[in-house]
């Protein structure tokens, strides 16, 4: 099978092939089709993925999330699994939409605080407004590095998450379960000034890390690799609010052999993920309650089962820095 290729250099347009996906597809393409071009200076060289690496035989959480948000960039296998989640738990759509709105408010808040660098892990398929659009609406010089472990997601990101400010938006493959690799990769990109704070965005991604992979240690490793003054913005699914229903929905990911299962965690377990960070007001709360734009409907709180918050790194490697 031919690889999916992307080529670029700063002095010539970047071109690549983009996968055309639709819920009605029943046949996996040997070569991902369609094309786009982009001129920028983030990458120079060639990156390739074989079609065998692009999994369309198993549901992927990012493509299921796209379905929950009403998107069209998913395969039939993703739609089938997502529809089963919604059949069991209609609130999954409310939670997905509320999480997207939370991400927008968080990034806006951080940008207004003066943050100009954002590391988005588990990017997901593009859905406007995207993170860099929100950040750059406040500060045109904001820089964003999108990271995902699904070539399809990353390819769409490379095509659609295009900033008008060249060199300020980058894209890379990375797996959250390899935090040291992510830090090494991020440092190798020409995106961030590592002397300045970076906002690490983990939007509805940490619950796809199983307990045996030690999500707390993963986040601590990422924290230790970030400059002092950096932030963690994290949202996470919980069973605290509707345990039985949330458990039935989460079970679909295992039953349909998705590329990652869901591990719901309690408020206390999620709060520990902010170890080494100082929570910013209003702290760790249900995501509709995090600096809402309008009065929160109590009925919404019954249908959105995620906690979220922002913490700032004011310590070095978990140890308080002397004044």
Image (cartoon, helix red, strand yellow):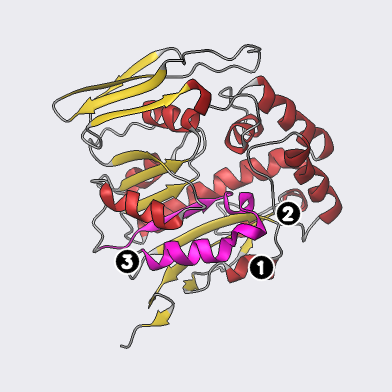
Image quarter of residue 195:
bottom left
Q: Residue furthest right?
A: 244
What distance separates the C-alpha of mark 2 from that of mark 3? 35 Å
Image quarter of residue 155:
top left
The location of residue 3, given as percent across then percent down, is: 41, 20
Q: Earlier in the sequence, mark 1 or mark 3?
A: 3
What residue is rendered at 56% in x and 69% in y?
A: 283
Q: Is residue 310 visible?
A: no
Q: Is residue 61 left or right of residue 112?
A: right
Tag 2 residue:
301
Tag 1 residue:
269
What distance separates the C-alpha of mark 1 from that of mark 3? 25 Å
Q: Earlier in the sequence, mark 2 or mark 1?
A: 1
Q: Secondary structure at mark 3?
A: loop
Q: Are discs 1 and 3 less than 8 Å apart at CB?
A: no
What residue is rendered at 33% in x and 54% in y?
A: 184
Mark nearer the viewer, 2 or 1? 1
Q: Which residues are magenta?
A: 196-225
What residue is rendered at 35% in x and 64% in y?
A: 226
Q: Classify mark 3: residues with Cα within 10 Å, few (<14), some (14-19) or many (20+).
A: many
Whether residue 213 appears in magenta in the rendering, the answer is: yes
Mark nearer the viewer, 2 or 3? 3
Q: Is residue 289 left or right of residue 251?
A: left
Tag 3 residue:
227
Q: Earlier in the sequence, mark 2 or mark 3?
A: 3
């Amino acid at each position: 099978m031919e690889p999916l290729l992307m080529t670029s250099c700063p002095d010539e347009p970047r071109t690549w092939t983009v996968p055309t996906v639709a819920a009605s597809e029943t046949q996996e393409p040997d070569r991902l089709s369609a094309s786009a071009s982009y001129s920028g200076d983030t990458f120079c060289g060639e990156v390739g993925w074989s079609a065998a690496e692009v999994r369309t035989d198993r549901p992927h959480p990012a493509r299921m999330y796209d379905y929950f948000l009403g998107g069209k960039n998913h395969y039939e296998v993703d739609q089938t699994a997502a529809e089963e989640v919604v059949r069991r738990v209609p609130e999954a759509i409310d939670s997905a939409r509320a999480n997207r709105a939370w991400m927008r408010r968080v990034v806006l808040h951080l940008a207004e605080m003066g943050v100009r660098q954002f590391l988005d892990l588990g990017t997901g398929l593009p859905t406007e407004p995207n993170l860099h659009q929100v950040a750059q609406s406040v500060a045109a010089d904001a820089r964003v590095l999108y990271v995902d472990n699904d070539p399809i997601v990353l390819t769409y990101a490379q095509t659609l998450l295009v900033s008008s400010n060249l060199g300020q938006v980058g894209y890379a493959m990375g797996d959250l379960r390899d935090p040291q690799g992510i830090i090494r990769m991020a440092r190798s990109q020409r995106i961030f000034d590592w002397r300045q704070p970076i906002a690490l965005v983990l939007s509805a991604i940490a619950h796809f890390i199983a307990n045996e992979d030690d999500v707390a240690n993963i986040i601590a490793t990422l924290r230790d690799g970030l400059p002092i003054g950096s932030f963690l913005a994290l949202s996470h699914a919980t069973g605290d609010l509707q345990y039985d229903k949330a458990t039935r929905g989460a079970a679909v990911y295992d039953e349909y052999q998705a590329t990652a299962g869901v591990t719901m965690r309690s408020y206390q377990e999620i709060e520990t993920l902010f170890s080494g960070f100082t929570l910013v007001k209003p702290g760790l709360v249900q995501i509709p309650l995090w600096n809402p734009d309008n009065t929160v409907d109590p009925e919404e709180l019954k249908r959105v089962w995620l906690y979220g918050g922002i913490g700032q790194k004011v310590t070095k490697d978990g140890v308080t820095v002397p004044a």
